[in-house]
Amino acid sequence: MDSSKRKDSTNSVFADPNSENNDEEKEDLCPGFKDADAFVKYGLGAVLSATKASASLPQTGDEYDFYRSFPGFQEFCERQGDKLLQGMSQIMQHHGCRSHMRDRNKLTGLEERFDLVVDSNDVILERVGILLDEADGVNRSQQPVLPAGFQAPKIVVSSWNRKGSGSGSRSETFRLLHAKNIARPQLKFRGKVDNSNTPFVPKIFIKPNAVKPLPSYFTNKQIRKERPEDLDVPAALADFIHQQRIQEHVEDMFSHPYQYELDHFTLTESLLSKPQPLMYKPLDETKCSFIETLEDLVALNEKLCKLSEFAVDLEHHSYRSFLGLTCLMQISTRDEDFIIDTIELRGELYILNEAFTDPAIVKIFHGADSDMEWLQRDLGLYVVNLFDTHQASRALNLARHSLDHLLKHYCTVESDKRYQLADWRIRPLPEEMVQYARSDTHFLPYIYDCVREQLLDFNHGQPGLLQSVWNKSKDISLKKYVKPIFTEESYLELQRKQKRSFNTQQLTAFRLLFAWRDKLARQEDESTGFVLPTHMMNKISEELPKEPQGIIACCNPVPPLVRQQVNELNLLVQQAREMPLLKAEIAAQKKKGLTPIKKADVTLFGPHDTSRVSESDFHNCSTDEMPIKQGMLFAEDEAKMDVDEENTSGLVAKAKITQFEEPETQNDPESLPVGQMKARRIIESFENPFRMYLPSNNVHISKNAKFDPSSKIFEISKRWKLQSIEQQQKELDAKKKAKEEKKELTKKVADERKKAKQTYQESLQNVPTVREQAAESVKPGTKRERVASDVGESTPKPSKKLLKSAEKPEKTEPPPAEPFKPFDYRKSDLKVFAGNKPTDNTQFDPNRQSNDFRKKKKPKGQKSNSGGGKSMSYMAGKSDRGFNHNWPKR
């Protein structure tokens, strides 16, 4: 039925509705494809395989240059390149574009080919947009203005998305459903969505079917309302702060609430026995209920608690929310289908925990890995006794493990997956989306019976294979939701997936943009793909535009938040451009403190070839990096300074390969006779031409001579051993004795210092202070009496500062001043200012300088060093640097 409908719809694309002969001639849309869906599936598969193949090719850079050096790889690349250019030329010719792609000119050929590809892409994408608008029912041409009462003729548009319902009846047109202007469901939620950078805390506060009671932290969760000081912080952080205050266990806070029940869950015999498959009812004969009120939800829970199994599925939306939204829940029994509006009943769905955690009821899911996390995050629901049909299909080694394949294999039902990626926030739901949601769970109970039967038959009636599926399903139900946490290194994981090599500037821009995107997405409750898609972030990081217009040019189409925050993004890019330009690998190694690995630019460059490496690239083996034995202040610290003397040397490691040193041999020379040892030395002399000039260390000594006491060799070796042992013992004794003497000496010096300090402090107790001495000297009629010290009393000599401070009070009374008498210059001898030196006068002259020393009598034969004819203001000094007549002449 469906295939005939598709044929009719595809025929209408090219056929004339009035001619039946053309319908018979043209049966297929394209050669080998019945309809557009088959062609699209084949095209997507080809694109996916090509993308996977391209990811395994060598990356641009050193890896590609290495492979390019091989002639076979170069020929293969050229051959495949010619094929690609030929295919692109055919596509361009088909769309009426210029297709001269095989221009080999190195200067202009690349630019022209790039322009041709850009122009062709614009033409093809424009046609694709027109056809999509036509498929969506949007007509770009304006409809003409018609007079009132005039009916316009109906224009029949033949399209690939129209499926005929039969002969003589009108065709049904499918719409591409997406929400453009929909109110955000987050605004209706009672509790604010927690997008903070804190771990996720389970929402459960009532635990039905509990074997182990719920921890007190979850039961007293309403205490948060009594804590006004924590209202400014996120809910998870407030819970964590309160939990630290009351000193509860962190394990209870982040553990799975039903961990104990799942660990102790045992299967009944009926679940491991062979079932009798119960046939499903047709969709048209099955009742479907839409649950959107609390009363209907309570009634549904009562129905589910009386059943032995039911099927569950979820519909999720993640594009306009940071963490994602669970928009719909489908539950199917063997007699009835239920569709629950999880957006409207988000805060009340914890009621279903009574049925979801009942170990006597089987919950049937298909691919429940994500469903478990969504149930915990949004609804606070947990599952006990889960059966996953996806794990069962893997155990049976089916061709495919999707629900679509299971429906075809067991129920012969063609599922329609066009609404799998639709926007499930739309309210009210269209009828097509309701039917799609029902089909996901309506057939699962029957598939559950068929799969269990085949698992037992596949294992010859033994329940081992079925038991393994139950165990894997239990592991899935133990999964815990983990909220995405932003760290300083979160961007590295995403950057590795891109398989692109960035320099330091590009990597810094990528890191800053990643942090900006995460922060804004949490604030606005939008997904990171909506704020700034990853491919656009890569483009901005690679280009590093200098102006905001360049950032806008890197995004097509421009995300709305990027257009709003373009100035802030420009500042981040400019900050990245200020970083020093290095390769990302070298920068990462420098950040870790490692020596950067020098990559060879030449193909024949070896890792041990240092002829092309500069001295700055070598590792710095300076003595500053080596451990140094520190100095010791006292002898007691010597025992604490246990520095290995071998490590204090300048060399980091000994050379492994030397030119002149003889390598150490591990062979036992005792096992070889004298002739073989001589032959080995001859061979070694050929291997090393300098061997003959080296002293021979391996002199052959027989074993008996070594251990025979009567031999001379034994006597010599014994004597040297004894002497070496005695010498070592003497050195050890001398070291110990020197250490003990140093200890005694330091101890004696310390005792003397203590005694001197003690006596000095005792002597200062009877000495009056400066203030006391000044007070006594001010009193009228009192004189200080000098106290004579006792004979034999030894007092330490006070310091100069103390003497000066003690002398100052004695000079308080100045001596009587003499009357001023002016000097009579008539008595002065004015001849001293003449050139010749005056003769010494035996009479005392008070004006003569006090430091005027008389000439010493010198023996005859020595000349006087003083020169005549000098001014008396210059005093000839004594110097050892030479006589006056030795100065250089002008």
Image (cartoon, rainbow, N blue to C red):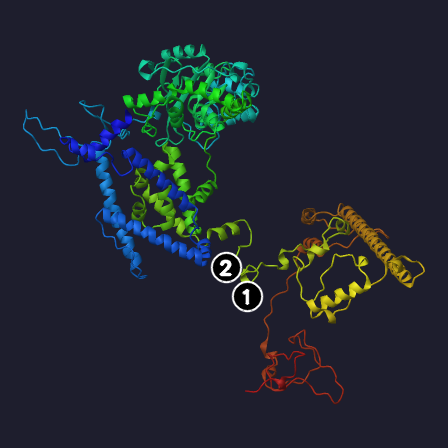
Answer whether residue 174 is visible to the viewer in this image. no
Disc 2 residue type (three-letter): Ala
Q: How many marks?
A: 2
Q: Which is nearer the eye, 615 or 246? A: 615
Residue at the extreme right: 710
Q: Could you tell me which secondary element the residue under label 1 belongs to? A: loop
Position of the C terminus, as image quadrant, is: bottom right
How many C-alpha atoms fall within 10 Å of the one at disc 2: few (<14), some, or many (≥20)? Answer: some
Q: Residue at x 67, y 64 (%)?
A: 658
The x, y position of residue 186, in whole percent, is: 35, 26
Q: Quadrant of residue 409?
A: top left
Q: Residue at x 69, y 59 (%)?
A: 649
Comparing 30 with 733, the one in front is 30
**Residue 424: image location, x then y, percent:** 33, 26
Please say if 248 is above or below 104: above
The x, y position of residue 240, in whole percent, is 51, 27
Q: Quadrant of residue 19?
A: top left
Q: Residue at x 72, y 49 (%)?
A: 782
Residue 608, image x, y percentages: 57, 60
Which kind of residue does numbered mark 1 sit on? Answer: Ser
Tell which circle, 1 or 2, labels the residue nearer the N-terminal end.
2
Q: Kindly identify which numbered label has been placed on residue 600.
A: 2
Q: Is residue 124 visible?
A: yes
| Location of the N terminus (image quadrant) | top left
Q: Against 865, is 771 above or below?
A: above
Residue 611, disc: 1
| Gap in angstroms between the C-alphas marked 1 and 2 | 12 Å
